[in-house]
Amino acid sequence: MTIGSFMTGRILRWLGLAFLLGCGAAQALTADQARAMAAGDTDDRIAAINQSLAQADARTAAFLQALGEDAVKLSGDQVFIVRDGTSVDAVTGAQASLPADAEDAMVNNRLRGEIGTALASINLFAKDNKVRAAAIATLLAETDESKLPLVQKALAAETNADLRDQLAMVQAAILLGSPDAAKRLEAARMMADGNNRNTKTVLLERLRVETDPQVMAALQASLATVEERLAWGNRLGAMFSGVSLGSILLLVALGLAITYGLMGVINMAHGELMMVGAYATYVVQGLFQKFLPAAFDWYLVAAVPIAFLAAALVGAALERCVIRFLYGRPLETLLATWGISLMLMQLARTLFGAQNVAVENPIWMSGGVQVLGNLSLPFNRLVIIGFAFAVLLAVAWLIARTRLGLFVRGVTQNRPIASCMGVNTARVDSYAFALGSGIAGLAGCALSQIGNVGPDLGQSYIVDAFLVVVLGGVGQLAGTVYAALGLGLLNKFLEGWTGAVLAKIAVLVFIIIFIQKRPQGIFAMKGRSAEA
Amino acid sequence: MKTETGVAAPAESVPRPALELPGRSALLSRAGWSAFVIAVLLVCVLAPLLNLVVPEGSALHLSDYAVALLGKIMCYAILALAMDLIWGYTGILSLGHGLFFALGGYVMGMYLMRQIGREGNYKSDLPDFMVFLDWKELPWHWALSDSFVATLVLVLLVPGLIAFVFGYFAFRSRIKGVYFSIITQAMTFAAMLLFFRNETGFGGNNGFTDFKRILGIAIATPGMRMFLFVLTGCTLLGFFLLARALVRAKFGRVLQAIRDGESRVMFCGYSPVGYKLAIWTISAMMCGVAGALYVPQVGIINPSEMSPANSIEIAIWAAVGGRASLIGPIVGAFVVNGAKSWLTVAYPEFWLYFLGALFIAVTLFLPNGIVGLARRWKRGGQ
């Protein structure tokens, strides 16, 4: 992720540059300026950089960019930008051969920071909204009084309302340092609208050195408002990750709700069927990379049905060869399927190696949408939430509306009568088990998008998944949904409060106590079948 | 749930003694006693002789490795016996017995850690890991760890108490069958996560290791090792007699009745809660003892002993040997663990295939395990 954001930052900066270059020169960069920025005492260089910003043109931006990337070389009075072996005169922009005695322009960390904010303030005038937004974010993190005129100029020119607000925030942050108490007061009040973690830092920093009581009160009031808003961001963030975890639990538990909830088969190999789905996704990804690199972004479209089929086939084979003979003996089924899970895990190790393998997200699933200053929702999580509910709807429809669903429900409720009515119960068992396994495969496909794929993939979810089904109540899809989302939310909220491990333990203890109170789960089946 | 142990079996051509339950006569038959005495002699006389007296080069010499391995497997056999009492005789499959085993082990481990004294890496009164965490004094739950007597009591008390409380609530609300199995699994999983944390005060990931002495005697000497071996063997045989006495008494018969038809037992006027709770607690305490014997012999205890996979493995030892027969689980523990120590060395990549296949084969083809197979073979031969 960090690498990704770094890359996008770079791309944005380049976009800004391209735009500036396209505009042509407003006022040329002089050789003296370039020289002053590239060499000498750090303080003087910073002054030179800030000075050049007043009438910055494309060449200045390009030069600063190059300086920040250590691509500037000096030789006598001449300053060169050297990229990919070709050298360009920084002042004229013409190709120039690099003299042999050219030296690197040294850039220390302080200077690098200055160059970053300088480039950002140039980018404040870029055409692309995204570039401007990125520039504003940089300036908000590094407030610098010398940028005030530029910010004010940009504020006057800004047309996008959203960005105007943010620019105003930057201006306020800079004005907080102003010697005029009235300006500080106004700025402190304005800062209350900030929705950024940086706003809080800026306010706290100012609060430490502020002496004027009126401004101090305003600062504290603003701080309280900002903190409140940040707290909301955190709360929403916890809720989102709760829903996200819940949707994964839902996917994992849906398959179990069919095999265990409806058929009464304890399938300890369920986690390994997920692993089959995840490895199927991995294989499909590999095939796309090799044979269809152009369509790589859409490999998931092929991977989803293949993951389903692979897991369903394995499941059907298991049902035919092993589980069929153990109906009505749940404890034996548990042990036999545990054995199957051990063998499948070892098989994965033999075929794919014991190391985890990585499945790449398609481009459209990477990145995220920024909702609040401190809350961004990753696309892959959003897609999985949507996917989980789509699968849920499909399963609900399959069970409630199709002939197969009718048969499954019939066989579950009363096997002999269903058989008497001419239902081939053995075949229905196979289909139902394959369906449950296929859904496990889908869960594995989804999991491959948020983590690594390895032989142990299923193990970490299987205890949770069983608890979801048990908590929700056997034989109920609705119960599974509520239990999955409830557990996900509970887990994430406790996590914010007590830390991950204790939250997990608390949830397990909660479930153990809950089952004591309601052994039949949230939604108990009524009637005789409950006591079966 | 009906098992094939004769109670619910259809009428067979060969008449069998009533319900195949041990009668009120002797604890063991004449042949049984002879076998028992031979076993005692093997453990208490022959093994020490072969290990300590017979010189190392001799073909009859019992190597230290073999002693350590057999000692370890005998601890597992106690576990399998405990599992058999609760699963084979009462029909309750626990997937949390590894927890009780580990708890017994941890209690003993705490005592052994204190016995290290100032000889740890940091030359401190506190165990090394506490120095590492910058703790200044022993946490409250280590208060009794200096006393050997208290340790012996706690080895029984801690697993027993936890099992009692857990079982009381579970059995009172009539949690049965698979539900019970799954929440016991959740219980041991939660405990494992808890013990992985450094703050819990049990050494976190690494657990306890590097023990030096027990009761002031160095732990790594051949004599001490042999003593622990003999002690484990005698405990196993003692527990076997205890289990035998339990299942042939009225108590044991009620347990088997609960297994075969809990509702009927209730209609007959018994309350199953007390019976289940009693055998569940006894079984947990046996596991605790096994853990306490295991730790000084193996020299390490860490939270991975509590992983759900370990607890399920206990069930397979009992199933392979034969449930609802007391000798079966002991045989099963020896066979499976013997195969494990051989296969994991000879063909490490095949061990999990073998174990998995064993799970499937036993449940599909050998519901009564090796003992059942032997019985069938004996009957067929007559």
Image (tube, helix red, strand yellow):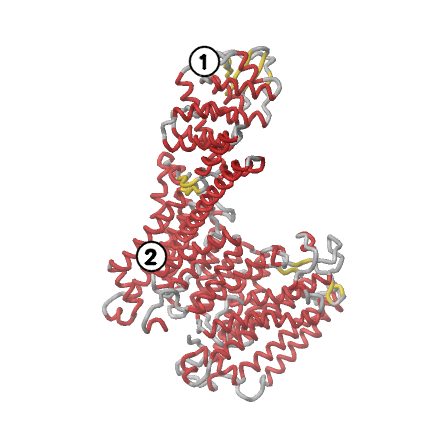
Mark sitting on residue B131:
none
Does residue A286 appear in this view? no
Give coordinates of residue A496: x percent, y percent.
Answer: 50, 51
How far is disc 1 from disc 2 in space, using C-alphas? 70 Å
Residue kind at label 2, given as amino acid type: Leu
Q: Nearer the viewer, residue A344 or B13?
A: A344
Please tell me in which quadrant of the rendered image residue B29 appears: bottom right
The image shows residue B342 at horizontal and vertical percentages of: 59, 60
Tell me residue B133's x, y (percent): 66, 52
Read off the residue under disc 2.
Answer: A435
Q: Are marks 1 and 2 on the same chain?
A: yes
In the image, what residue occupies the spot 39% across and 18% down? Answer: A22
Q: Earlier in the sequence, mark 1 or mark 2?
A: 1
Front one among A272 and A511: A511
For mark 1, name the chain. Answer: A
Q: Chain of mark 2?
A: A
- Residue sitting at 62 percent across and 69 percent down? B290
Q: Name above or below for residue B55 compared with residue A232.
A: below
Name the amino acid, label 1: Gln
- For image coordinates 34% across by 63% down, the residue present is A476
Q: Position of residue B127 (x, y in %)?
A: 70, 57
Density class for disc 1 (Cα within 10 Å; few <14, some 14-19, many ≥20) is few
Mark 1 secondary-structure assignment: loop
Badge 1 is on which residue? A27
